[in-house]
Amino acid sequence: MIAVAPPPARVQVVAHEFSFVLSRQTIKAGWATIELRNAGEDAHDLRMRRVGGTRVYAWPVTQAGAVVDETYKLLPGRYVLYCSVANHRALGMQAALTVRR
Ligand SMILES: [Cu+2]
């Protein structure tokens, strides 16, 4: 008998000037593929940090129209997502994701 790991959860994060819209706000803990889709006109990136944690998960700067997937194993908790380009976070490029047990 072969044990098959469940597929990673998937979340799409759509970037515009200046917002992030998530395809879902809650996922289960474990492997997750998070896709940054730049639907805006400027370059954007994505940073994610668990509230109370220190690790910063990073997606590279992504040009208009481009898509970048990153897959990470996530612990339960609340995560803050933001764009670290220029002052985009202050302009509204911030969102929250909840990872459940
Ligand atoms: Cu940005």
Image (tube, rainbow, N blue to C red):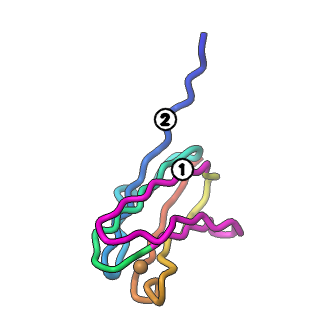
Q: Nearer the viewer, residue 60 or 27?
A: 60
Q: Which of the numbered marks, if any, corresponds to residue 92?
A: none
Which residue, given by chain and number where applicable, does mark 2 sit on? 7
Q: Is residue 95 above or below residue 18?
A: above
In magenta, the rendered stretch is 45-73
Q: Categorize mark 2 by other alpha carbons within 10 Å: few (<14), some (14-19), many (20+).
A: few
Q: Is mark 2 within 8 Å of ligand 1?
A: no
Give the foreground label among 2 and 1.
Answer: 1
Residue drawn 51% across and 54% down?
Answer: 70
The stretch drawn in magenta includes residue 56? yes
Q: Nearer the viewer, residue 84 or 91?
A: 84
Question: Ligand 1: which quarter?
Answer: bottom left
Q: Nearer the viewer, residue 49 or 64?
A: 64
- Which image quarter: residue 31? top right
Which residue, given by chain and number where applicable, does mark 1 sit on? 71
Contact, CB < 8 Å: mark 2 with mark 1? no
How much space separates mark 2 and mark 1, taking CA atoms? 11 Å
The secondary structure type at the circle numbered 1 is strand
The secondary structure type at the circle numbered 2 is loop
